[in-house]
Image (tube, helix red, strand yellow):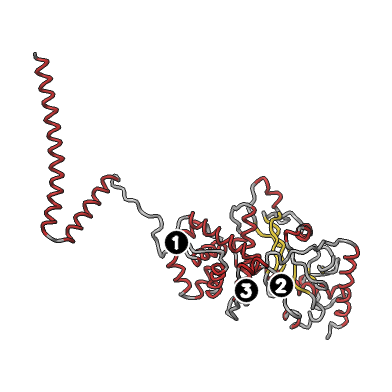
């Protein structure tokens, strides 16, 4: 009997506790409901909304444990606001940050948009995407720094930088090409030291070392004679300081002559062969064959080698001096390219194919900038290039020919004879 009495007392105590909990919860609910009803009864809608908001915030804080998530990018202007502030503000800012003038920046955006290569997304415009790319290649900043500047995540920055790089690489098929002009180029015809000796010259060819990022197992293959991890890029340029051919993908240990022969031997490389009777200037590292004129071997060549001023030792020495002065155009073009795009001296750890694509994109952007601002500092003229899908499709095979590299003695003799035909009369008329 005592056990049955104690069990009944325990059951009654638990029942009373449950009833008290239920009553307390109902009382809390009734209190909140009374608070809302009282606000409703007052007829003040603004107060009602404020009470509801406070109540929802209190519920959210209770569910989240009191932690409120803070956005990562909440500093400064958003990306679109920053772009508009730069393009509509002081022109020096655009030149400093994006390495080009405001008209050139707008011109490149119109090209990318008009050629149907790039379309704006819901959140990022073409101008903002190009600004991300220019800030990356112009200053070699990390993507996190660019993300903080444009108030986007690193994934968004990476995606849009890759999109612009691929678009410029695709556009390079049209922009990086030989421009056929009638007559002699003004750069030659306007200089009595060059005309009429080099009137058949179309440009200069040279290989340059651009920093690369290679895995440790391939570091020896990419380490050049200066001990740098680099890639050997073969380029052609005309006398407007525009690139007409860019060939990437070779390691830093590769010799210029090897890269040269590989570029000429494969039809898919689409090398722009000069017409019959015309030629490119090359240095002594390249072979002496038709359509490629090197200097005389075993003679002074660079200006730094001439300690006695204008005292030349013969027609070969004089020809090498003029050859060096004219071929210097590509050296200045390389210097302009690397000064504008600092990323070429601090290549990110992209895979090899993307590193070559980045170099081509920078050369394409260089050509577009030189089209609008030829002097690279002040606006001279705004030239218009018309790009359409039909034009781009027709120019895809513009440089593809059936020419074969002629390494025979006859080819070398032909170029040597042409060089003598230029050097000897030029030496005889050196005083005008």
Numbered mark located on residue 238 in the image: 2
Q: Secondary structure at mark 2?
A: loop
Mark 1 in CB contact with mark 3 (< 8 angstroms)? no
The residue carrying pointer 2 sits among few (fewer than 14), some (14 to 19) or many (20 or more) residues within 10 Å by Cα, namely many
Numbered mark located on residue 122 in the image: 1
Residue at the spot 64% in from the left edge and 50% down from the top edge: 214
Rounded to the nearest whole Å, what is the CA distance between mark 1 and mark 3?
31 Å
Rounded to the nearest whole Å, what is the CA distance between mark 3 and mark 2?
12 Å
Left or right: 126 in relation to 243: left
Numbered mark located on residue 169 in the image: none
| Image spot of residue 209 (x, y percent) | 69, 60
Q: Secondary structure at mark 3?
A: helix
| Image spot of residue 306 (x, y percent) | 80, 73
Residue 26 location, quadrant: top left
Quadrant containing the C terminus is: bottom right
| Furthest-front residue in this view | 390
Q: Earlier in the sequence, mark 1 or mark 3?
A: 1
Left or right: 320 in relation to 113: right
Residue at the spot 42% in from the left edge and 64% down from the top edge: 78
Would residue 155 be visible to someone looking at this image? yes
Q: Is residue 3 above or below residue 315?
A: above
- Circle 2 or circle 1, nearest the eye: 1
| Image spot of residue 16 (x, y percent) | 11, 30
Mark 3 in CB contact with mark 2 (< 8 angstroms)? no
Quadrant containing the N terminus is: top left
Numbered mark located on residue 370 in the image: 3
- Circle 1 or circle 3, nearest the eye: 1
């Amino acid at each position: 009997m005592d056990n049955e009495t104690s069990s009944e007392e325990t059951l009654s105590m638990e029942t009373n506790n449950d009833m008290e909990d239920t009553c307390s919860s109902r009382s809390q609910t009734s209190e909140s409901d009374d608070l809302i009803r009282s606000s409703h009864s007052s007829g003040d809608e603004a107060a009602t909304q404020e009470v509801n908001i406070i109540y929802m915030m209190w519920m959210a804080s209770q569910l989240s444990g009191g932690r409120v998530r803070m956005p990562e990018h909440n500093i400064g202007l958003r990306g679109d606001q920053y772009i508009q502030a730069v393009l509509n503000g002081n022109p020096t800012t655009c030149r400093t940050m994006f390495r080009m003038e405001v008209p050139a920046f707008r011109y490149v955006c119109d090209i990318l948009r008009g050629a149907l290569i790039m379309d704006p997304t819901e959140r990022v415009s073409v101008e903002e995407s190009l600004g991300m790319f220019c800030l990356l290649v112009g200053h070699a900043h990390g993507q996190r720094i660019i993300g903080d500047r444009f108030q986007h995540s690193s994934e968004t920055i990476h995606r849009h930088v890759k999109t612009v790089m691929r678009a410029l690489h695709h556009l390079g098929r049209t922009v990086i090409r030989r421009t056929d002009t009638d007559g002699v180029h003004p750069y030659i015809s306007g200089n009595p030291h060059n005309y009429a000796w080099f009137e058949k010259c179309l440009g200069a060819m040279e290989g340059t070392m651009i920093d690369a990022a290679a895995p440790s197992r391939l570091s020896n293959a990419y380490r050049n004679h200066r001990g740098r991890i680099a890639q050997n890029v073969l380029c052609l340029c005309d006398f407007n300081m525009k690139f007409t051919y860019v060939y990437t993908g070779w390691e830093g240990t590769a010799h210029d002559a090897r890269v040269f022969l590989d570029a000429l031997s494969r039809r898919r490389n689409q090398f722009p062969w000069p017409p019959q009777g015309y030629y490119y200037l090359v240095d002594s590292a390249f072979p002496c064959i038709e359509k490629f004129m090197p200097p005389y071997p075993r003679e002074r060549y660079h200006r730094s080698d001439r300690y006695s001023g204008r005292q030349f030792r013969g027609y070969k020495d004089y020809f090498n001096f003029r050859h060096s002065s004219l071929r210097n155009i590509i050296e200045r073009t390389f210097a302009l390219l690397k000064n504008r795009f600092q990323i070429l001296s601090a290549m990110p750890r992209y895979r090899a194919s993307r590193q070559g694509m980045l170099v081509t994109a920078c050369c394409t952007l260089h050509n577009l900038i030189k089209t609008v601002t030829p002097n690279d500092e002040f606006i001279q003229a705004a030239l218009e290039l018309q790009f359409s899908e039909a034009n781009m499709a027709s120019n895809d095979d513009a440089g593809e020919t059936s020419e074969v590299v002629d390494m025979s003695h006859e080819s070398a003799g032909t170029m040597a004879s042409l060089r003598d035909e230029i050097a000897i009369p030029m030496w005889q008329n050196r005083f005008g």
